[in-house]
Amino acid sequence: MVAPMIALVDPKPRFNPKDRRAFLERLPAKEAAQVAGSRSKLQRVLAGESVENLYNEGKDLLYQWKRVGDILTATGNPIEATVSNTYEVAKAEGAPHHGWLKQYEKLPDHLIQKSIRSIQKQIQEHEAWIKNPTLKLGDVNQVDPRALSDYIHHKWPSDIQRQKEQLSILQGILEARS
C-alpha cells in the first residue's frame, strides 16, 4: 500500500497583492461585494486599487493595517524592522513589541541587565537545539519528521529572531538612559 502524499504548505507565504484581487474575482458577484464591503469597493479593487488602501480609507491611524516596514518614526521617516533598529520601531504606538517595550522601560537598569543575560541564555539554548534537537526533544526517532523539521527550520529560528529583537529593545532602553 502506498502512503498518500501530503503537500506541505509554506508557513511563510510570500506576499502578493494580486492574490486578494484574484480571490474576489473567483467569488460570485454578490458574495464578492459583501467581502469587499460594497459593490463600489469591489469595483475599485477589481480596477486595481489596493485592498489595504480601501480598508484604511477613513480609519483612525491606530486601526489601519500596517506592515512593520511601513511604520513611521517620530520624524516621519519610514524604517524597516531589523534587529538593529527594533528599539526604534517598538517606540511607535501600535508597533510590534511596543507593549513589551513599555513594560521594560519601567524597570531599573539592574533588572534590564538581568533580562538581557536571560535572553542571551535562551538564544544560546535555541541555537544548541537547532544543532542537536535531542537536547530538547529527546529521542528524535519518536518525533514526527515534519514536526522535527518545523522546529529546526521555523519554530526555533523564529524564537531566536524574536529574542534578538527583545535583546535589541533592552539594549536600546539602556543606551537611551545613558
Image: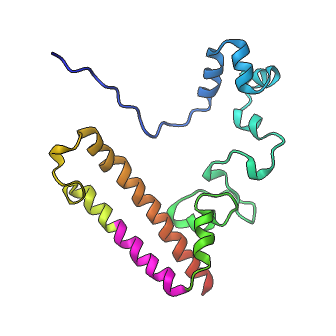
* Residue 38 picture quarter: top right
Q: How is the image coloured?
A: rainbow
* Magenta stretch encompasses residue 143: no
Vertical order, 137 against 14 (above or below): below
* Magenta stretch encompasses residue 113: yes
Could you say where residue 15 lies in the image, as x and y percent from the top left? Answer: 55, 37
Q: Residue at x 76, y 34 (%)?
A: 54
Vertical order, 52 against 80 (above or below): above
Q: Residue at x 42, y 53 (%)?
A: 158
Could you say where residue 160 lies in the image, as x and y percent from the top left? Answer: 40, 60
Could you say where residue 6 lies in the image, as x and y percent from the top left? Answer: 31, 25
Image quadrant holding the C terminus, namely bottom right
In depth, the one of 167 and 34 nearer the eye is: 34
Vertical order, 133 against 43 (above or below): below
Q: Residue at x 73, y 26 (%)?
A: 36
Q: Which residues are magenta?
A: 109-123
